[in-house]
Image (cartoon, rainbow, N blue to C red):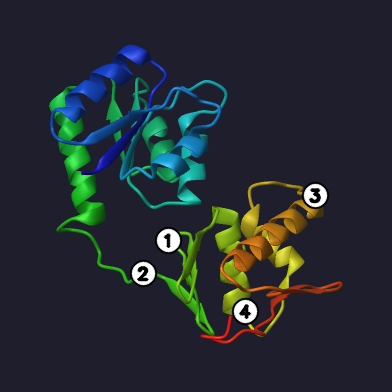
């Protein structure tokens, strides 16, 4: 059953969409905390997002950009804005389609079905899952999952990005500046201690699956994956 996430601050519209979409067999989640949309997105992992533009604190354009950093799931904007530039902005910020208010619910359903077919169904481009492998250690990037032998642990997006960089660059060094840009490219300044904290979390996740001392700090340069384990000898 596909899951649809609705990000709409007009409660009447959100409830109406929820009831209508649910009738067609979809699971629907309506967001109420508009300060933490991405937390809800990561927890829900929806197949499609219906996203209003005018939202409290941050607008829909902002949240669509955040979603695009972590997911390629379809995003359909629903807005009372009818200007051409609003529709251009929606697409430029990562949206897949645009519906103007007031809308007919059948149009919404048709666009939902169309986007789901394009993303996952008969019209979807078939892609192999991205997996990084190093000496038995397997990183499933899209799943944000790390495996070694019979042990599995889940990762955050930033932990996944760090491990992906370390594994792709092995045995070379992943520079601190490169990691900072990859993880926080939307921020002008990030305290380097933030990177240290995330590296520590990666080390902890590796320990959870039986691999200790796997990330080496190269003073003045960055970090390197230290392959001291072998498959079957954790």
Q: Are marks 3 and 1 in contact (CB under 8 Å)?
A: no
Which mark identifies residue 168?
Answer: none
Residue under the image location 20 percent in, 29 percent down: 21
Residue under the image location 86 percent in, 73 percent down: 219
Mark 3 and mark 4 lie on one chain; the one further toward the N terminus is: 4
Q: Are marks 2 and 1 in contact (CB under 8 Å)?
A: yes
Q: CA distance from mark 3 to mark 4?
A: 24 Å
Which mark identifies residue 169?
Answer: 4
Comparing labels 3 and 1, the label whose residue is closer to the camera: 1
Mark 2 and mark 4 lie on one chain; the one further toward the N terminus is: 2
In this rendered view, identify the residue nearer to me: 210 or 41.
210
Q: Can see residue 12?
A: yes
Q: Residues within 10 Å of mark 3 (few under 14, many from 20)?
A: few
Q: Residues within 10 Å of mark 4 (few under 14, many from 20)?
A: some
Residue highlighted by disc 2: 129
Q: Is residue 140 above or below residue 172?
A: above
Mark 2 and mark 1 lie on one chain; the one further toward the N terminus is: 2
Q: Secondary structure at mark 1?
A: loop
Q: Can see residue 102?
A: no
Residue under the image location 49 percent in, 79 percent down: 133
């Amino acid at each position: 059953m596909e899951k649809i996430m609705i990000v709409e601050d007009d409660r009447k519209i959100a409830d109406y969409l929820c009831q209508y979409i649910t009738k067609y067999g979809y699971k629907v989640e309506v967001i109420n905390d508009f300060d933490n949309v991405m937390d809800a997105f990561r927890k829900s992992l929806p197949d499609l997002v219906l996203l209003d533009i005018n939202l409290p604190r941050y607008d829909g354009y902002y949240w669509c950009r955040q979603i695009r950093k972590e997911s390629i799931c379809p995003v359909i904007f629903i807005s009372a804005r009818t200007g051409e530039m609003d529709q251009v902005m929606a697409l430029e910020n990562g949206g897949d389609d645009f519906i103007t208010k007031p809308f007919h619910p059948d149009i919404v359903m048709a666009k939902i079905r169309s986007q789901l077919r394009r993303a996952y169904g008969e019209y979807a481009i078939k892609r192999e899952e991205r997996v990084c492998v190093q000496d038995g250690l397997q990183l499933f990037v899209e799943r944000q999952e790390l495996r070694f032998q019979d042990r599995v642990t889940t990762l955050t997006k930033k932990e996944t990005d760090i491990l992906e960089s370390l594994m792709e660059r092995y045995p070379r060094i992943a520079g601190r500046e490169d990691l900072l840009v990859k993880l926080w490219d939307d921020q002008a300044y990030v305290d380097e201690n933030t990177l240290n904290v995330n590296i520590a979390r990666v080390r902890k996740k590796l320990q959870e699956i039986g691999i200790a001392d796997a990330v080496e700090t190269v003073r003045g340069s960055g970090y390197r994956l230290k392959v001291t384990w072998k498959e079957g000898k954790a």
